[in-house]
Amino acid sequence: MEDTNNSSPSYTRYNYGVVNLKHKGVVTTTSVGSVYDDFISALTQVSSRPGVVPTFCENRPDLIGDIFYESPGYWWYAMQYNSLFDPFETLNAGDEIFIPEL
């Protein structure tokens, strides 16, 4: 397979991580091997510290972001680092999580 993107694309929230690959003469659009995948893989290299979800932060990743990163907008960072995809099922009081450094 070869990457058919010859120029640096301007990323938007709609096409971030999308690449065009040519395989057996057919060009297809995919996110496999994308910049996003590289970012997620790199998270394993980030230092972190262990923590426990406090009662008032149960099901509230925005509060985790606000407490540890001083911005609720970073809620996704700790969730992604801990492979948590649904805060209502996996972010419960007393759960042990890791807080990655920015």
Image (spheres, rainbow, N blue to C red):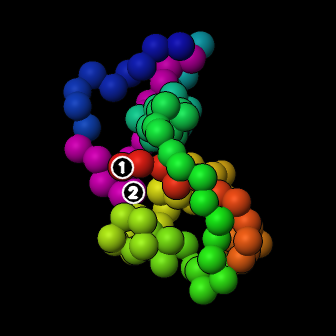
Would residue 63 be found to the left or right of residue 14 on screen?
A: right
Residue flagged by tag 1: what amino acid is it? Leu
- Mark number for residue 14? 2
Part of the protein shown in magenta: 10-23
Taking the spot 29% from the left edge, 47% from the top edge, the residue there is: 11
- Can residue 29 be seen here? The reply is no
Residue flagged by tag 2: what amino acid is it? Tyr
Name the one closer to the observer, 38 or 47.
47
Magenta stretch: dominant SS?
A: loop
Image depth: mark 2 or mark 1 in front: 1
The residues bearing labels 2 and 1 have C-alpha atoms spaced at a distance of: 25 Å
Looking at the image, is 39 positioned above or below residue 57? above
Give the residue number, with chain letter if any, for mark 1.
102
| Crowd band around label 2 with a 10 angstrom C-alpha radius: few (<14), some (14–19), many (20+) | few
Taking the spot 48% from the left edge, 24% from the top edge, the residue there is: 21
Residue 100 in picture, x, y percent from top left = 48, 49
SS under mark 1: loop
SS under mark 2: loop
Taking the spot 30% from the left edge, 54% from the top edge, the residue there is: 12
Residue 45 in picture, x, y percent from top left = 49, 31
